[in-house]
Amino acid sequence: LSERRNQLRSAFELYALSNAVSTEGMPEEKRIYTRSDQMNRVCKKISSKSASISCIEIERKTTGFVTFNDHSISPPTHSLSKESIHRVHDDYLGLLVDCLHSATKKREIEPGELLELSWTVLNNGRADKLTCYPSIEALELKTCFLEALSKFRYPRYTGERQNVTLPLSVKGR
């Protein structure tokens, strides 16, 4: 009813609660990849209407945790397409943004800074070999980025490993 009335945040909260209840008791490493089709549908609508509200934020506030789509469970393709990469990033980039917000609060980085992250997508759909320019080696931000990337799940593929480069601009919250 909320979704039909275009009360998208309310609809997403209800779907997230329903999803949380239906996955209760699952091991954390499986539960994280149980985002429902209803959540995906409403999240897409929310994202198209507002860049200032994040489904990750809504779900975390509603349930205390966040779920994602595991794009690596499909049969492997020959290569990793740009469309596939964009789909994964639509799901997961909020985790990297959360890291930036946290680092800004801790004053590890300042609003206005530009970072360029790069990583490799392995054939099994996992991210590996994070690098950042400028270097963040001694910062908690690197640990946060590594933890976030460990959750990313790209589609599996049989071709050459793919490198992803992502520019990030640090904004204040």
Image: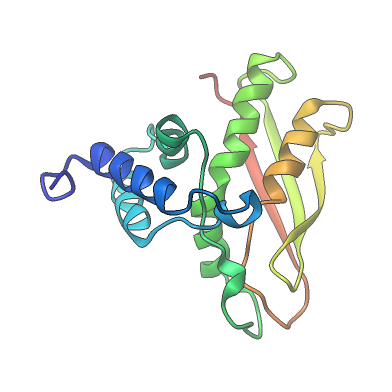
Towards the viewer: 150 or 173: 150
Above or below residue 69? Residue 57 is above
Name the residue located 68 percent from the left edge and 44 percent from the top edge: 148
Q: How many marks?
A: 0
Name the residue located 71 percent from the left edge and 20 percent from the top edge: 109
Q: Position of residue 15 (x, y in %)?
A: 32, 48
Above or below residue 143? Residue 30 is below
Image quarter for residue 133? Answer: top right
Name the residue located 72 percent from the left edge and 39 percent from the top edge: 145
Q: Position of residue 16 (x, y in %)?
A: 37, 45
Towards the viewer: 29 or 74: 29
Residue at the far bottom in the pictured view: 78
Towards the viewer: 93 or 72: 72
Towards the viewer: 140 or 80: 140
Q: Position of residue 124 (x, y in %)?
A: 73, 71
Left or right relative to 65: residue 169? right
Residue at the far front in the pictured view: 25
Above or below residue 79? Residue 19 is above
Name the residue located 49 percent from the left edge and 57 percent from the top edge: 34
Q: Position of residue 110 (x, y in %)?
A: 67, 18
Image quarter for residue 10? Answer: top left
Above or below residue 163? Residue 7 is above
Image quarter for residue 167? Answer: top right
